[in-house]
Image (cartoon, coloured by chain):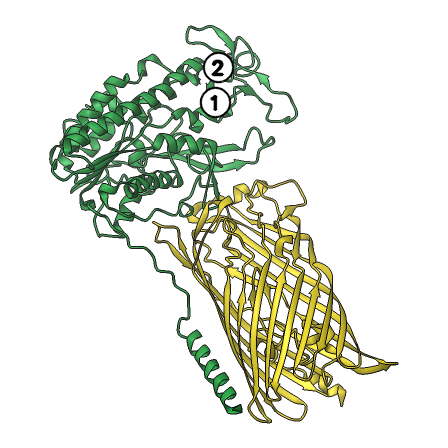
Chain colours: A yellow, B green
């Protein structure tokens, strides 16, 4: 019986994906996406293994949640006045996925009950591709960063009111950077350089959930920063033939710090059919000072604009879920996501700005064990006018992100 | 009660979905462009080879090679006209010289440097001119830039190289001011004087090419400007470019006055012997500017003791050196010319009633480029080959250099309240520097 869970866990439902401040993409559960990404303050399902390990042991039943999404960020650019040059990033579809499982059920250890969980997520995902011949090509033609995290979790409770959980996460990161360099060739060709590399990093997370009473719960999740260390990444040049010996292929190293975070969540259930949730998160993006792509062999004479100087940010999520009947649940949410990128450091590879998201979702119970979820979110930044000081490049940026998530929850 | 929750959530969700779908792509509204009071249909450009789009000239002084179609069509007046055409349709005709034109220097091969201090070895070749290049064009010309035109030689001197271009471009005109008057512009740009200094500079300070003194320069520019203004005094408007410091151009600034062994990077630099104008042989100093064509021949065997410049009996001939005194002369002349230009422009502008003429700070532009600037993430400097703005000859401009000049004019246009114009600048990234094979 439990084995066939694994198959039916091909659940396209619970994908929460958000390009959150910087390059975080919170793809954690479709249910949570529908609720504006709120999910740290109540014990919903196995997604707690990532959102709040402390909640995992308080989830009524074991479950496997699986899902994914399609996220399409688009950014428009208008060069600084008086230029009327405009460009738009190419349409891209990011596909975050997640799998959360609370396996092994609840074990009794004296007065303690213990539950184990596992999360596989893609929490940081960012990709932007500008037209190869756009104005900012010497700063960025393409930038993409993706991660895959595996996090085993152990969660305890004593007396069903307070849950404590601890997770260890191992993250794999993949970075791709491409931009033009000054090496003009015949027939209008232009040189470019491409950096591609992967690396690993590890971190810890700690979660607490406290049921104040039958209607109110409070949660907190503390996540350590994770340093993704890229080693032996490849550097490839595309330059005119006569310059090839000056730009031999090589390798590079880089360190990409993912921020520590603290999330405080509230879950409120004034009525058995209605659930409201609020999450407030603090991200320690200050750790991301620069992104140096350091060649291992002799330095090439190419320009870099590595300074990032991210600021710490706050995000706020509000969401609600209503059970219309035994079969259907509807959800809606709103979120605010502060931008870590300061004025003077806004680069077209991460044209970040404060984001507002509006979300909607629904869950349908297909059988006693299986539920399918669908969520949609529309996220937008206002128009942000900013300059990347080091490159003397700037203008107005505006981004839209559309997110669609599909997921399944198998409860047993 | 319960159904109200549901209704609220469902309605809210529907609104969200509908709000998100319609605007599929973000769009930022661009500012309105305007040509203001400028009549760019009658835009005429006057000047020397920089205005004509002269580029990749041969190392031999005063060769006609360097006028060809692909460079002509990226000259700053053409780029300016292109930006004007974004706002209002107009024609801009050039005296096109053909694909090979008057010939040019072409980079065929590049050998990587053994020592980065020396730079790569260049394999260049001369592209032959095509027969009958630049036949006198019919119809109205808008770019009247003329290679080798000097403020001090506005009337053709048949023995001077500029006469070759003048006869082919203006077969029916007696001299350049007459051609300018016949062009009868409503809007014009004029950038002249650089070639006066270059003639002296590339000759290594030959007194035969001594540039006009500032008063003579001022008088000739006054004569030319009055010809330009003659036909449309009621409406004509224009911009006059300043003269840059040519000593910062790679032709004069690329070579250090020492010898470095291209085969042995760690060898200490050796002093070079140069010849003074009076024939006296001395060591080269930091004040000396060795001319770029020496690039491949310094220290090379030439039948005299050691290699060129390495022995007192084999000094570098003075014609290949712009010494301290000569380069200081060129630099102070540029400043004096610009002083004359400023007062001339304001005097003529006052005669026209004000708000019609202005000078463009090209001296400051080239000074900043000499130090290196970053534009749209591109590091740009006066450095040879990799600086991006000077072409193979180290004197004239690449399309990227031309675009920077065009943007300086556009910036001035936008900054003049009396023009009431708003013109979009060019994207520097769209214009190549030196083309590598």
Q: Earlier in the sequence, mark 1 or mark 2?
A: 1
- Residue lying at 44% horizontally and 24% vertically, measured from the top left: B252
Q: Which of these two is toward me, A31 or A313?
A: A313
- Residue A178 visible, this angle: yes
Q: Is residue B194 positioned above or below A398 on the image?
A: above
Task: Give the quadrant of residue A284.
Answer: bottom right
Tell me the quarter of the image containing the N terminus of chain A: bottom right
Q: Which residue is mark 2?
A: B316
Percent across and percent down for residue B133 are: 26, 36
Q: Are marks 1 and 2 in contact (CB under 8 Å)?
A: yes
Percent across and percent down for residue A33 are: 57, 75
- Residue lying at 59% horizontally and 17% vertically, measured from the top left: B270
| View extreme (right): residue | A110
To which chain does the residue with label 1 belong?
B
Have a look at marks 1 and 2 and say if they share a chain.
yes
Percent across and percent down for residue B118 are: 56, 28
Q: Which residue is mark 1?
A: B294
Q: Is residue B433 positioned above or below B214 on the image?
A: below
Q: What element does badge 2 sit on?
A: loop
Q: Is residue A208 left or right of residue A37?
A: right
Tell me the quarter of the image containing the C terminus of chain A: bottom right
């Amino acid at each position: 019986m439990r084995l066939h869970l694994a198959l039916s866990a091909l659940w396209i439902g619970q994908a929460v994906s958000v390009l959150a401040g910087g390059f975080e993409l919170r793809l954690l559960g479709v249910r949570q996406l529908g609720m504006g990404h709120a999910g740290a303050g109540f014990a919903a399902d196995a997604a707690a293994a990532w959102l709040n390990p402390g909640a995992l042991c308080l989830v009524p039943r074991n479950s496997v949640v699986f899902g994914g999404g399609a996220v399409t960020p688009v950014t428009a650019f208008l060069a600084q006045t008086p230029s009327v040059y405009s460009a738009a990033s190419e349409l891209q579809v990011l596909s975050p996925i997640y799998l959360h499982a609370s396996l092994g059920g609840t074990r009794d250890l004296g007065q303690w009950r213990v539950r184990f969980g596992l999360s596989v997520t893609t929490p940081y995902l960012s990709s932007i591709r500008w037209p190869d011949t756009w104005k900012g090509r010497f700063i960025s033609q393409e930038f993409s960063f993706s991660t895959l995290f595996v996090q085993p979790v152990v969660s305890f409770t004593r007396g069903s009111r307070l849950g404590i959980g601890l997770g260890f996460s191992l993250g794999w990161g993949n970075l791709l950077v491409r931009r033009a360099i000054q090496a003009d060739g015949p027939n209008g060709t232009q040189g470019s350089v491409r950096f591609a590399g992967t690396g690993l990093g590890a971190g810890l997370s700690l979660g607490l959930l406290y049921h104040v009473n039958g209607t109110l719960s409070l949660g907190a999740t503390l996540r350590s920063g994770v340093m993704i260390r890229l080693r032996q990444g490849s550097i490839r040049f595309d330059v005119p033939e006569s310059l090839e010996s000056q730009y031999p292929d090589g390798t590079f190293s880089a360190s990409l710090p993912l921020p520590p975070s603290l999330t405080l969540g509230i879950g409120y259930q004034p009525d058995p059919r209605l659930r409201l949730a609020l999450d407030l998160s603090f991200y320690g993006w200050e750790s991301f000072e620069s992104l140096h792509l350091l060649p291992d062999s002799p330095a090439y004479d190419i320009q870099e604009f590595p300074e990032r100087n991210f600021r710490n940010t706050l995000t706020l999520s509000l969401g609600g879920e209503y059970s219309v009947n035994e079969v259907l649940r509807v959800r809606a949410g709103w979120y605010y996501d502060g931008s870590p990128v300061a004025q003077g450091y806004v680069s077209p590879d991460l044209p970040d700005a404060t984001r507002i998201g509006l979300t909607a979702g629904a869950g349908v119970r297909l059988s006693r064990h299986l539920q399918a979820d669908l969520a949609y979110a529309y996220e937008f930044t206002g128009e942000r006018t900013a300059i990347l000081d080091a490159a003397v490049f700037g203008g107005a940026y505006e981004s839209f992100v559309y997110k669609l998530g599909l997921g399944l929850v198998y409860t047993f | 009660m319960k159904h109200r929750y549901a209704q609220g959530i469902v309605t809210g969700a529907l609104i969200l979905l509908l709000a998100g779908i319609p605007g599929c792509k973000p769009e930022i509204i661009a500012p309105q462009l305007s040509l203001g009071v400028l009549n760019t249909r009658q835009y005429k450009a006057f000047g020397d080879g920089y205005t004509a789009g002269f580029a990749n000239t041969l190392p031999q002084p005063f060769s006609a090679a360097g006028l060809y179609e692909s460079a002509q069509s990226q000259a700053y007046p053409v780029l300016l006209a292109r930006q004007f055409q974004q706002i209002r349709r107009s024609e801009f005709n050039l005296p096109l010289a053909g694909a090979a034109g008057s010939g040019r220097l072409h980079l065929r091969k590049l050998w990587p440097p053994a020592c980065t201090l020396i730079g790569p070895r260049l394999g260049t070749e001369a592209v032959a001119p095509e027969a009958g290049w630049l036949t006198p064009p019919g119809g109205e010309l808008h770019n009247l830039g003329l290679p080798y035109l000097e403020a001090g030689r506005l009337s053709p001197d048949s023995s001077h190289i500029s006469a070759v271009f003048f006869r082919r471009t203006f077969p029916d005109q007696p001299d350049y001011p007459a051609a300018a008057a016949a062009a009868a512009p409503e809007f014009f740009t004029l950038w002249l004087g650089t070639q006066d200094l270059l003639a002296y500079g590339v000759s290594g300070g030959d007194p035969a090419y001594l540039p006009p003194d500032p008063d003579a320069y001022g008088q000739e520019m006054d004569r030319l400007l009055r010809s330009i203004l003659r036909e449309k005094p009621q409406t004509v408007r224009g911009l006059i470019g300043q003269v840059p410091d040519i000593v910062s151009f790679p032709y004069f600034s690329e070579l250090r006055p020492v010898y470095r062994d291209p085969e042995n990077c760690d060898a200490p630099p050796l002093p070079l012997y140069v010849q003074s104008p009076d024939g006296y042989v001395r060591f080269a100093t930091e004040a000396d500017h060795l001319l770029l064509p020496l690039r491949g021949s310094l220290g090379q065997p030439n039948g005299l003791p050691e290699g060129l410049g390495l022995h007192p009996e084999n000094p570098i001939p003075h014609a290949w050196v712009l010494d301290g005194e000569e380069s200081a002369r060129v630099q102070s002349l540029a400043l004096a010319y610009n002083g004359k230009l400023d007062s001339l422009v304001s005097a003529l502008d006052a005669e026209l009633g004000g708000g019609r003429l202005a000078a463009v700070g090209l001296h400051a532009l080239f000074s900043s480029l000499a130090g290196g600037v970053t534009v749209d993430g591109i590091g740009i400097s006066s450095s040879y080959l990799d600086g991006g703005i000077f072409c193979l000859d180290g004197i004239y401009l690449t399309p990227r250099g031309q675009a920077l000049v065009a943007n300086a004019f556009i910036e001035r246009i936008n900054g003049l309240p009396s023009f009431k114009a708003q013109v979009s600048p060019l994207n520097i990234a769209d214009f190549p520097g030196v083309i590598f094979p």
